[in-house]
Image: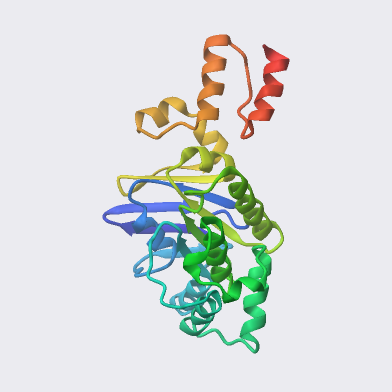
């Protein structure tokens, strides 16, 4: 999904969302960029998807295939049960389903939840269960693009791994395009393949995540936090002349250390 020639607050934005990949977005004020990706309140821009320019008539369809979830946002949920919450999503989105319950059960199954959870109250769930329910809710409309903000916040390592496995399953098995919005550069570096850094209402840089984070001087100059694993590799190479490769997994770095040091 390529966004070309979009004028946002006097700045011309050109950026790419890699299809069927996990993309990352970093920035202190990303709401404007997210709004563009959601195709909300847009005007005078050219939108190209799969090399085809999209006319205004197709925008409503595209919007229906994009779901945004902010996992940090505290919303008042009036529905008493998870079933009520998910069924309300079907009603509010005006989804035409022959069997709403079956669709709800299928969405829960994808995220690894039993339909036994349907009778529970949302506020009785653990943090990880709430995140999984919100993902199941997002899947009800069969989206092509999922924008997930702060999805890893307040998760322990076990549940973080569970969420990552799920996101990769959604990407690989269900051909979903995923965007993770977070200022936790350790998570963004580890779990995304394509990265956009948004600063001062402009695209500061975009490209392959590993390649971007190797630009230590550039990122430091622009006050972008360096992931711990990248900083370790950089310092080892600089101070010990280790010639280590940049990896996402610390175990791969340890293997390199045994080879080179």
Instruction: Give the quadrant of the C terminus.
Output: top right
96 versus 145 height, above or below? below
Residue drawn at point x = 46 percent, y = 75 percent: 59
150 versus 53 height, above or below? above
Nearest the viewer among 33 and 107 is: 107
Q: So how many labels did they put on this image?
A: 0
Q: Which colour scheme appears in the figure?
A: rainbow
Which of the 4 quarters of the picture holds residue 190? Answer: top right
**Lateral position of residue 217 relative to residue 238, left or right:** left
**Lateral position of residue 15 relative to residue 261, left or right:** left
Nearest the viewer among 155 and 209 is: 155
Nearest the viewer among 73 and 81 is: 81
Residue drawn at point x = 43 percent, y = 76 percent: 56
Residue drawn at point x = 50 percent, y = 53 percent: 151
**Lateral position of residue 28 relative to residue 175, left or right:** left
- Percent x, y for residue 129? 56, 61
Determine the residue located farthest toward the bottom in the rendered image: 98
Residue drawn at point x = 44 percent, y = 65 percent: 38
- Percent x, y for residue 199? 34, 44
- Percent x, y for residue 163? 60, 53
- Percent x, y for residue 142? 60, 73
């Amino acid at each position: 999904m390529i966004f070309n020639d979009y004028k946002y607050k006097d700045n011309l934005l050109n950026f790419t969302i890699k299809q069927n990949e996990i993309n990352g977005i970093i920035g202190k004020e990303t709401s404007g960029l997210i709004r563009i990706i959601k195709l909300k309140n847009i005007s005078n821009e050219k939108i190209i998807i799969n090399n085809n320019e999209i006319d205004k008539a197709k925008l409503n369809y595209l919007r229906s295939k994009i779901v945004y979830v902010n996992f940090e946002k505290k919303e008042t949920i009036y529905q008493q049960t998870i079933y009520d919450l998910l069924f309300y999503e079907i009603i509010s989105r005006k989804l035409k389903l022959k069997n709403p319950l079956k669709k709800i059960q299928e969405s829960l199954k994808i995220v690894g939840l039993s339909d036994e959870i349907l009778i529970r109250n949302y506020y009785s769930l653990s943090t990880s269960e709430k995140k999984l329910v919100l993902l199941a809710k997002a899947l009800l409309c069969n989206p092509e693009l999922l924008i997930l903000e702060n999805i890893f916040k307040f998760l322990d390592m076990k549940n973080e791994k569970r969420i990552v496995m799920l996101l990769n399953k959604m990407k690989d098995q269900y051909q979903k395009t995923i965007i993770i919005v977070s200022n936790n550069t350790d998570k963004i570096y580890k779990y995304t393949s394509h990265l956009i850094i948004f600063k001062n209402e402009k695209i500061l840089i975009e490209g392959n995540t590993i390649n971007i984070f190797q630009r230590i001087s550039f990122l430091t100059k622009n006050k972008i936090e360096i992931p711990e694993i990248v900083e370790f590799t950089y310092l080892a190479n600089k101070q010990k002349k280790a010639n280590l490769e940049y990896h996402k997994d610390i175990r791969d770095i340890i293997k390199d250390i045994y080879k080179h040091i």
